[in-house]
Amino acid sequence: MKSSPSFYVVFEGIDGAGKSSQIQRLAHFLKDELGDKRPILKTFEPTGGSFGQEIRRRAKAGPVMSAQEELDLFVQDRREHVEETLAPALKAKKIILQDRSFYSTVAYQGSRPELGQSLEDLLQVNDFAPKPDLVVLLDLPAEIGLKRVKQRGQADAFEQVERQRKVRENFLELADERFLTVDATLSEEEIAHVVAARVSEMLKDKL
């Protein structure tokens, strides 16, 4: 029997859009639908490795990184993630559900004019990363996202409203045929239904 191909789904959006919750819901849906027929890997960027930890530490405790320092750390973290996690998972034909990817780096770094790089430039910097089969963009106004983040007590240097507005604009500009853009002001259940319907349709040719 021919082995099933991998299926790689990335969840994107501004801070507070609800990516982690939707990944959990999709993982449960796929487990119910597929049982043990297909292994599922949940992962995230920045990772829990040394580069990812440094990104989080600097975002919360400072000193504030320059735009170039920030970009370099994200790219280093991503290279490690691709080599150690994504490439083996794709080779093993796993279903991969990922919280943030190179699209986040492009959208966020693209909101920093001092970096002097266009979205296309930043895509080129990250062109070593595998392209997902589906990008679920949870689209949310910046004010709502920031309010949610503050309610969780998780606000940090990345989460200023003006920057989040620009990041949202960048995500929408990046959206192409890989993207499923969903209104993230809908209920969690409504969002999960939309995502599950698209994933089910796409998986028909991969099972």
Image (cartoon, rainbow, N blue to C red):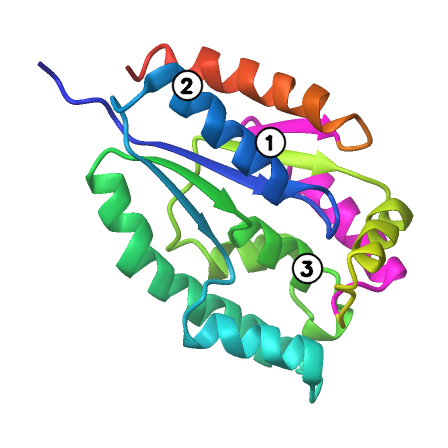
Tell me the residue at 47%/67% (across/down). Answer: 75
Please identify, in this view, whether the residue under mark 1 or under mark 2 is nearer the observer.
2
The extreme left residue here reads 1
Tell me the residue at 55%/30% (across/down). Answer: 25
Question: Circle 1 sits on which residue?
Answer: 176
Magenta span: 158-183
Q: Reply above or below: 197 against 31.
A: above
User: In the drawing, does residue 133 fall left or right of residue 4?
Assistant: right
Q: Residues within 10 Å of mark 3 (few under 14, many from 20)?
A: many
Can you give x and y, in whole percent of width and height, for residue 129 in the image? 39, 52
Question: Tag on residue 32?
Answer: 2
Q: Quadrant of the C terminus?
A: top left
Can you give x and y, in whole percent of width and height, for residue 181 in the image? 68, 28
First of labels 1, 2 by sequence position: 2
Tell me the residue at 31%/54% (across/down). Answer: 85
Circle 1 SS class = loop
Tell me the residue at 37%/60% (across/down). Answer: 81
First of labels 2, 3 by sequence position: 2
Can you give x and y, in whole percent of width and height, for residue 183 in the image? 77, 28
Residue closest to the eye, 76 or 123? 76
Q: Amino acid at mark 3?
A: Tyr
* The image quarter in which residue 91 lies: top left
Marks 2/3: CA–CA distance: 35 Å
Q: Does the magenta-highlighted stretch encompass residue 168? A: yes
User: In the drawing, does residue 29 fall left or right of residue 154?
Assistant: left
